[in-house]
């Protein structure tokens, strides 16, 4: 589970990596394209880390306003979907040409978010299942 402390540490690490890469580009140690690629990979990893925490974040049953099993199923779906999107994002930046990486990475995340929103809508708006009559 991501706590405030671990989130702040992760944010500090991201800033340190970005600053280090900027200095490396300024000192002509790496190409600007390599900097963009590295930042993209790091952001994909961050998406994976936060998405992995989603299904592990459970509220007490007394606080929940819906059926706990449905909420947990939605959290698992969200976590898995966005983890896969984050891996796709990082892999796009790692292996594809920069112009294509940007498009593929963002499309991958957009598809993941769309799937999560579609599942949320399906969970909220579907009719409750009717009990079957036993003869």
Image: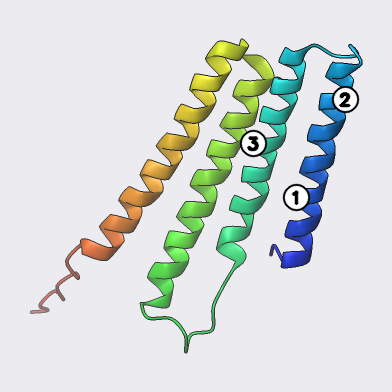
Q: Earlier in the sequence, mark 3 or mark 1?
A: 1
Distance, label 3 to label 1, CA atoms, is 14 Å
Q: Position of residue 9 (x, y in %)?
A: 81, 55
Q: Which residue is mark 3?
A: 44
Task: Name the residue located 89 percent from the left edge and 11 percent from the top edge.
Answer: 28
- Whether residue 109 sits left or right of residue 18 in the image: it is left
Q: Residues within 10 Å of mark 3 (few under 14, many from 20)?
A: many
Which mark is nearer the camera, 3 or 1? 1
Distance, label 1 to label 2, CA atoms, is 18 Å
Which mark is nearer the camera, 3 or 2? 2
**Vertical placement of residue 126 versus 93, above or below:** below
Q: How many labels, in total? A: 3
Instruction: Give the structural element (helix, strand or loop) at label 1.
Output: helix
Q: Earlier in the sequence, mark 1 or mark 2?
A: 1
**Vertical placement of residue 123 versus 48, above or below:** below
Distance, label 3 to label 2, CA atoms, is 22 Å
Q: Which residue is mark 1?
A: 11
Instruction: Give the structural element (helix, strand or loop) at label 2.
Output: helix
The quarter of the image holding the N terminus is bottom right
Camera-side residue of 26 and 48:
26
Where is residue 120, by image quadrant?
A: bottom left
Q: Residues within 10 Å of mark 1 (few under 14, many from 20)?
A: few
Task: Name the residue located 12 percent from the left edge and 79 percent from the top edge.
Answer: 134
Q: Position of residue 63 (x, y in %)?
A: 47, 85
Q: Residues within 10 Å of mark 2 (few under 14, many from 20)?
A: some
Camera-side residue of 132 and 38:
38
Q: Which residue is mark 2?
A: 23
């Amino acid at each position: 589970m991501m706590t405030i402390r671990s989130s702040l540490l992760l944010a500090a690490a991201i800033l340190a990596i970005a600053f280090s890469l900027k200095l490396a580009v300024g000192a002509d140690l790496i190409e600007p394209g390599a900097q963009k690629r590295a930042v993209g990979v790091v952001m994909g990893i961050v998406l994976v880390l936060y998405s992995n925490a989603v299904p592990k974040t459970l509220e007490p049953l007394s606080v929940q306003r819906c059926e706990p099993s449905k909420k947990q199923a939605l959290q698992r779906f969200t976590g898995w979907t966005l983890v896969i999107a984050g891996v796709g994002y990082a892999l796009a930046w790692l292996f594809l040409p920069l112009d294509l990486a940007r498009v593929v990475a963002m499309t991958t995340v957009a598809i993941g978010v769309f799937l999560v929103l579609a599942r949320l809508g399906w969970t909220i708006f579907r009719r409750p299942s009717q009990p079957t009559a036993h003869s």
